């Protein structure tokens, strides 16, 4: 109420002031005393009750702060820029996290929609379609439950096809979630019948705009999913980006998966079997039901379902509907996010320590001004407030720069990393609020201590080396960032130069993509065998056949047992199927026995790698030994040298079987061999002209495998470089300040005959000691940080002495550079002038 | 009662002991307005001039009672201390 009256006064202050003046005038005329006192003062006193004196003094402080900063443009610019970049990094990071993990799906009332998922040791996962339907039929705490299954489909009009992400969804998906639509309708309950699949589809806005020219007449038109026709019934609104945590180009009802692969028993089973896995599920909470009640109900339902079908137990969790919420990627991203968050916070603290140090130097230099203001009656709190206001002005200016950085930076980084996120990183009010909150935090972090320190009454002990503590903290933080950056860069270099044990640089991978909907197992086998035969018949081309390329995105494990062992004792092993001159083409030597030969499939001969031979046939000759895979016994004919065929950091025991033709093979050829790609394309097209042929250099796989680490190393490098720059600025500021503060003392010592060397030692020893302590603390913290990052480091120990030594060298060079000018100034002090100072 | 009237009244009933000047009267009145304990209306004074008249509001009356009780308690306490 008081606030409203105050506001009313503020808005009508002219009228109120006029009334007060008139009232006082009346009073005077009545009392008739001419020397009644100062009329203006009386009015001011009465007025002061109303106008927030506080607010006025804030404006006063602001004006004063601006004037003060204008007087020192160098300091202001340096502080605003360094803090601005630090806040910018921080805010960019927040903008990405916001888009990926905080912003809710753009559906109706998104706060009531929950992602449902399971969590096991292997991370987050989903449910079988059968279990989803069980939930949907029985869960009372949800007003609707939807299921989603992602698939890769070649999508388009006749003749034009593009690899697209299609999500097969339950028929009530659009109604339950309340997905906003641009055109047409969502799916109908009748389109969700498992035994009567309907070929209908809804397009995403981006697909409709980019590939169908925003055609408003598209409803009812026919498009193709692979080579099956689907009818477009709707287009989603622009803001709807899907609910599975990745790109979504179109949606179709779950039962229509059977239309895509009519010959595939697996698809039928996928939609019906309780054993299949793993589709995404989300639900809308019924009115009045809380999250915990819903979760408890699902836990009971899940247990019933799993008991009925004798499935292992699972843990059911709910998450808010965000891009990452409950997806398998979530935990992986969270690890990277946590690391980046710590690093970026470290940089922000470093920038704060830096400005704190500069402000501290100024606060001490401003002692005289502060003493005058105190003796004029300002209390300490008032002066501290004034100094904090100066800090806040700096911080808010930095926040503005930060928002500008956050507007552009994520796009630049994603472009450099060649990785476009499936969610748009845009600035919204929460990002701006975050930047301002960071600024407020930074202001408190850097301005409070110097303000308190600088306003201490004279005579109070001033031995607290706050300056040195800040300096040490700064050095420590930049050491951590630099060591981590060094280790990450060393690791990427190591991986790049790593000899994977075979020829990566001059090998090209040719892959064949057949339209899955018209290929059953038999046709696949026929295609594979024909392809292998036709390519083998061309003379003079070195080639190799494999079930998959080296360094693939996936791996295939099987189980085998040694003679005499039971099925329960079976060992896990990495399986490869190869043909042609696989080992020759990759330059992988056979170290024992022989390479695979034609006819080995009938002889049941295999090659194993050294790791396999070592693990299971230690101190024995593996040649001629038998292993049993499934029910078939295979004889080891050769041992191949170990090579990083699947991962870059470890080599599992591997078995190489002769190519069976059960899967569509991948062809490996020598890069630059003339005409070989055209030849392979021609051969494949001759067998089936619908096949897509694609060739990529094998080194691309290596790059992709290193991409995550490269990006992280790049980011760590940028952060480390920025940290180093801040540390140098900070150190040189402190050194310069120390020299200035002790000018008089230096003058006296020089007058008494001190050598320049002694002077330098005297002046800089405190700060140098602080920097060394910072280095030590930084090393300890780095070891902890590096240990946490172990999984991102290929072939580099987290305690690699080279990284630590390099940081020490870089820092001592920068430290010397930072100290050089202040030290020179110290030795050039003229004793006579110095004594006159003050 | 208008401001000048209040000052005169205080002076009169206290036998000239309490003389309130404008520099303390008007800030005090403004504070009462700010707290909503009095309301002010313009009227015509005895000698036909525009003057601002103050009246207690309900909230003001309640506040007055509370203050008065507190004051009485205080006076009694002081008297007791002085009598012993």
Image: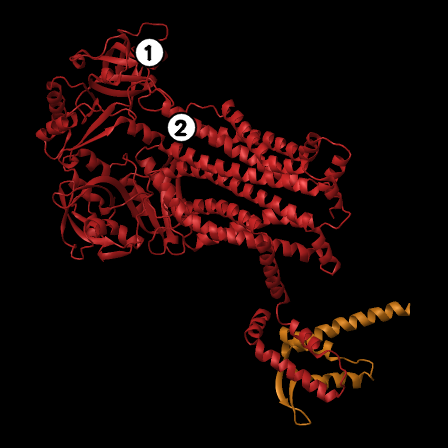
Parent chain of label 2: A
Q: Label 2 belongs to which residue?
A: A492
Q: According to the rendering, which colour does chain A have?
A: red
Instruction: Classify A395 as above or below A329.
Output: below
Q: Residue at x 54, y 27 (%)?
A: A809
Residue A663 point in image, percent of width and height:
19, 26
Q: Nearer the viewer, mark 2 or mark 1?
A: 2
The residue lying toward the viewer, choosing from A200 and A821, is A821
Q: Can residue A803 be seen from the camera position used here?
A: yes
Residue A758 point in image, percent of width and height:
71, 30
Secondary element at tag 2: helix
Q: According to the rendering, which colour does chain B have?
A: orange
Q: Residue at x 34, y 35 (%)?
A: A307
The residue lying toward the viewer, choosing from A70 and A491, is A70
Q: What quarter of the picture does the N terminus of chain A occupy?
A: bottom right
Callout 2 crowding tier (Cα within 10 Å): few <14, some 14–19, many ≥20: many
Q: Label 1 belongs to which residue?
A: A613
Instruction: Classify A420 as above or below A683.
Output: below
Callout 1 crowding tier (Cα within 10 Å): few <14, some 14–19, many ≥20: many
């Amino acid at each position: 109420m008081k606030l409203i009256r105050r506001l009313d006064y503020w808005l009508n202050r002219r009228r109120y002031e006029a009334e007060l003046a008139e009232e006082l005038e009346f009073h005077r005329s009545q009392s008739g005393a001419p020397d009644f006192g100062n009329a203006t003062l009386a009015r001011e006193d009465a007025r002061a009750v109303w106008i927030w004196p506080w607010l006025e003094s804030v404006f006063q402080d602001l004006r004063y702060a601006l004037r003060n900063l204008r007087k020192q443009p160098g300091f202001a610019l340096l502080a605003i820029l360094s803090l601005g970049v630090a806040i910018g990094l921080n805010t960019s990071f927040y903008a990405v996290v916001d888009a990926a993990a905080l912003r809710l799906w753009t559906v109706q009332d998104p706060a009531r929609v929950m992602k449902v998922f399971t969590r096991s040791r292997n991370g987050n996962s989903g449910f079988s379609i059968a279990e989803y339907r069980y939930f949907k039929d029985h869960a009372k705490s949800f007003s609707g439950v939807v299921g989603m299954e992602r698939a890769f489909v070649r999508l388009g009009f006749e003749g034009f096809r593009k690899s697209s992400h299609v999500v097969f969804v339950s028929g009530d998906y659009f109604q339950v979630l309340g997905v906003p639509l641009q055109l047409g309708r969502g799916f109908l309950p009748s389109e969700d019948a498992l035994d009567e699949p309907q070929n209908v589809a809804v397009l995403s806005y981006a697909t409709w705009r980019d590939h169908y020219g925003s055609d408003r007449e598209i409803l009812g038109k026919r498009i193709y999913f692979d080579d099956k026709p689907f009818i477009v019934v709707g287009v989603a609104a622009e803001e709807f980006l899907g609910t599975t945590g990745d790109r979504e180009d179109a949606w179709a009802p779950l039962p229509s998966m059977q239309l895509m692969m009519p010959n595939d028993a697996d698809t039928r089973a996928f939609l019906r079997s309780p054993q299949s896995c793993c589709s995404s599920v989300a639900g809308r909470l019924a009115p009045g039901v809380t999250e915990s009640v819903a979760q408890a109900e699902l836990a009971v339902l899940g247990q019933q379902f799993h008991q009925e079908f004798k499935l292992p137990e699972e843990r059911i969790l709910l998450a808010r509907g965000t891009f990452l919420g409950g997806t398998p990627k979530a935990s992986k991203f969270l690890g990277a996010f946590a690391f980046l968050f710590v690093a970026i916070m470290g940089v922000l603290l470093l920038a704060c320590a830096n400005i704190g140090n500069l402000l501290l130097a100024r606060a001490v230099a401003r002692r005289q001004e502060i003493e005058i203001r105190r003796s004029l009656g300002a209390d300490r709190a008032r002066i501290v407030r004034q100094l904090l206001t100066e800090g806040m002005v700096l911080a808010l200016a930095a926040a503005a720069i930060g928002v500008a950085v956050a507007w552009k930076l994520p796009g630049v980084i994603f472009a450099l990393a060649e990785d476009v996120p499936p969610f748009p990183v845009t600035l919204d009010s929460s990002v701006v609020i975050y930047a301002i909150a960071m600024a407020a935090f930074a202001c408190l972090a850097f301005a409070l201590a110097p303000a308190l320190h600088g306003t201490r009454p004279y005579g109070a002990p001033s031995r607290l080396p706050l300056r040195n503590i800040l300096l040490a903290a700064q050095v420590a933080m930049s050491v951590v960032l630099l060591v981590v950056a060094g280790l990450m860069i060393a690791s990427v270099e190591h991986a790049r130069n790593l000899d994977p044990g075979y020829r990566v640089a001059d090998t090209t991978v040719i892959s064949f993509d057949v339209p899955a909907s018209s290929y059953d197992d038999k046709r696949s086998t026929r295609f594979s065998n024909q392809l292998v035969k036709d390519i083998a018949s061309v003379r003079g081309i070195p080639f190799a056949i494999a079930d998959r390329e080296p360094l693939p995105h996936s791996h295939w494990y099987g189980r085998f047992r040694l003679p005499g062992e039971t099925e329960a004792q079976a060992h896990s092993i990495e399986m490869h199927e190869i043909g042609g001159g696989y080992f020759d083409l990759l330059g992988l030597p056979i170290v024992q026995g022989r390479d695979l030969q034609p006819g080995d499939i009938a002889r049941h001969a295999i090659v194993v790698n050294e790791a396999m031979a070592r693990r299971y046939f230690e101190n024995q000759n593996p040649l001629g030994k038998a292993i049993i895979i499934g029910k078939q016994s295979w004889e080891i004919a050769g041992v191949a040298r170990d090579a990083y065929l699947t991962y870059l950091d470890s080599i599992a025991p591997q078995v190489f079987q002769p190519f069976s033709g059960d899967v569509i093979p991948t062809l490996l050829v020598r890069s630059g061999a003339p005409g070989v790609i055209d030849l392979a394309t021609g051969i494949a097209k001759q067998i089936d002209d619908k096949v897509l042929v694609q060739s990529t250099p094998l080194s691309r796989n290596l790059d992709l495998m290193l991409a995550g680490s490269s990006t992280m190393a790049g980011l760590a490098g940028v952060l480390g470089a920025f940290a180093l720059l801040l540390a140098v600025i900070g150190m040189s500021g402190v050194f310069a300040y120390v020299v200035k503060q002790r000018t008089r003392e230096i003058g006296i010592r020089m007058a008494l005959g001190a050598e320049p060397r002694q002077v330098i030692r005297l002046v800089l020893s405190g700060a140098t000691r602080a920097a060394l302590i910072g280095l030590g603390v930084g090393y300890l913290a780095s070891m902890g940080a590096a240990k946490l990052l172990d999984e991102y480091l290929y072939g580099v120990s987290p305690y690699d002495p080279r990284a630590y030594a390099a940081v020490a060298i870089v820092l001592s060079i920068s430290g010397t550079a930072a100290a050089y000018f202040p030290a020179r100034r110290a030795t050039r002090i003229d004793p006579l002038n110095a004594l006159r100072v003050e | 009662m208008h401001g000048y009237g209040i000052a005169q009244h205080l002076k009169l009933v206290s036998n000239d002991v309490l003389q309130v000047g404008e520099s303390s009267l008007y800030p005090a009145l403004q504070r009462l307005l700010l707290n909503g304990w009095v309301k002010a209306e313009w009227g015509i004074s005895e000698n036909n001039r525009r003057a601002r008249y103050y009246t207690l509001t309900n909230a003001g009356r309640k506040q007055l009672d509370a203050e008065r009780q507190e004051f009485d308690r205080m006076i009694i306490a002081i008297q007791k201390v002085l009598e012993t």
